[in-house]
Image (cartoon, rainbow, N blue to C red):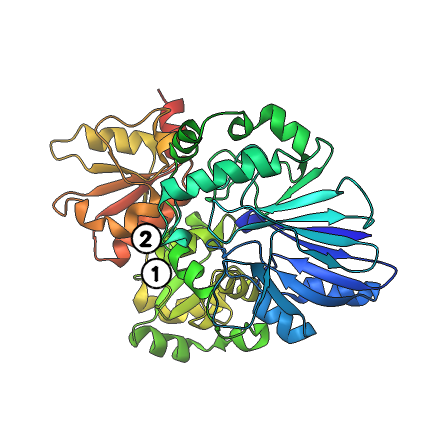
Amino acid sequence: MFFAQYYLDCLSQASYLVADEATGRAVVIDPRRDVDEYVADAEAHGFTVEAVINTHFHADFLAGHLELAARTGAWIGYGSRAVTEYPIRKLADGERITLGDVTLEIMETPGHTPESISVLVFEHSADPVPYGVLTGDALFIGDVGRPDLLASVGTTAEELGRMLHHSVQHKLMGLPDEVRVFPAHGAGSSCGKNLSTERQSTIGAQRATNYACTPMSEEDFVAIVTAGQSAAPGYFGHDAALNRQDRGLFDAAAAHRPLTTEEFAARLDAGAVVVDARGPQEFAAGHLRGAVNVPADGRFAEQAGAVLAPEADLLVVAPDGREGEIVTRLARIGFDRTAGHLADPEAALPALADRLTPAARLTVEQLRGALADEHPPLVLDVRTCGERAEGAVEGSVHIPLNELPGRLGEIPADRPLVVHCAGGHRSSIAASLLRHHGRGEVADLLGGYAAWDAAG
């Protein structure tokens, strides 16, 4: 048996290629949208990708089922409750897919979404115990999938929570201890609240250590798995809908469009939004007025999806040589309206000098002095609720970054603003978003709350 996990750090997302080496028949599970790696690996091993299976309608990324089916001719599979605009094979609970001696078995595990499935992998069809189980977003390492995301429109969080209780506590925990667990996400994903950095585990380990796998009533389970969930990024609903639709395919070559300074300026004047993927310090030194700063060195796709609108035409300013990467990472969350990127920003930006502006960044001492002034700024904390609970700047207003686009109206317009996060990354995003929406006096705190706390 050939078994490979592909892990995307930016989205904490895992996908899988399973094949029978004797027959060369293969299946890809939960692929991302840029599918070259799966196709290349299959070709290198002489495999034929016959099927692509999604464990559920993903909300945090746009799956690559259509791209992979177009490249390989594979059929697309979902759980029996799935309804799509494109042809699919509906997979029933207990159904077996034979690749040769290697065999997959479908296990319906609804709860994160109604149509969720897990996939049991048998190295040999007659094995009494599976090699492993691909749990999608039903069971994570250290957590379970949250039942309250926008992917579950039409079913309440309580209804899904009860489904998840049965799926986790009875079906998945009914598997033998030695079965390996391979989830669709790891630490950092907004699909859960307590995900581990480990990328695989066992049923036995989860039975012993995962809070949600401890035997409990439906009521207690629903209460514990829905409590303390942070707000999901705004793009989740967009992606959950797109994953059901017969949408356009991602073409990396066509998406990477370098623009001259004149072309870039013309599109900017036509209303396109600039997403500047340089680091906060470089952005602060000089950026195009109105640009939104989402640094590439971080959770770029998720954060871009949190603060940008999917229907906006986007112009990319990227760190040197990373334009294609940025466009691909936007496409992974279904942001396809990329009008182009600025070719050679280091040389081009000086030619747009009349459109450039710096961004204010304050040190802890400067903020302390400003707060002692007769007309102090309002301090805006964009960390998560969990981070906020560990300590806060006295008198600050708390709006997590994921919630900020929908809560801009709550921020007083008659005071200067100083934005902070934990270390200075998210605060640059938030401050640039506020300026993009017309707020004038906005600065962010260098070093974030960590620097503030360290200074006493």
Left or right relative to 96: residue 135:
left
Q: Residue at x 27, y 33 (%)?
A: 367
Name which residue type carries label 1: Ala
Please say whether residue 314 is visible from this viewpoint: yes
> Above or below — where is 386 with respect to 406?
above
Neighbour tally class for label 2: few under 14, some 14-19, many 20 plus, Cα within 10 Å: many
Q: Are dots 1 and 2 in contact, CB under 8 Å?
A: yes
Q: Residue at x 50, y 72 (%)?
A: 343
Mark 2 secondary-structure assignment: helix
> Above or below — where is 226 with respect to 32?
above
Q: Residue at x 20, y 52 (%)?
A: 440
Does label 1 or label 2 sit earlier along the sequence?
1
Please say whether residue 196 is visible from this viewpoint: no
Name which residue type carries label 2: Ser
The residue beneath circle 2 is 432
The residue beneath circle 1 is 291
Left or right relative to 355: residue 297:
right
Mark 1 secondary-structure assignment: loop
> Above or below — where is 216 with respect to 146?
above
Residue 269 image offset from top left, x and y in percent: 29, 75
Separation of residues labelled 1 and 2 (CA atoms): 7 Å
Nearer-the-camera pick, 385 or 17: 17
Residue 122 image offset from top left, x and y in percent: 77, 48
> On residue 415, which mark appears?
none
Neighbour tally class for label 1: few under 14, some 14-19, many 20 plus, Cα within 10 Å: many
Q: Residue at x 72, y 37 (%)?
A: 179
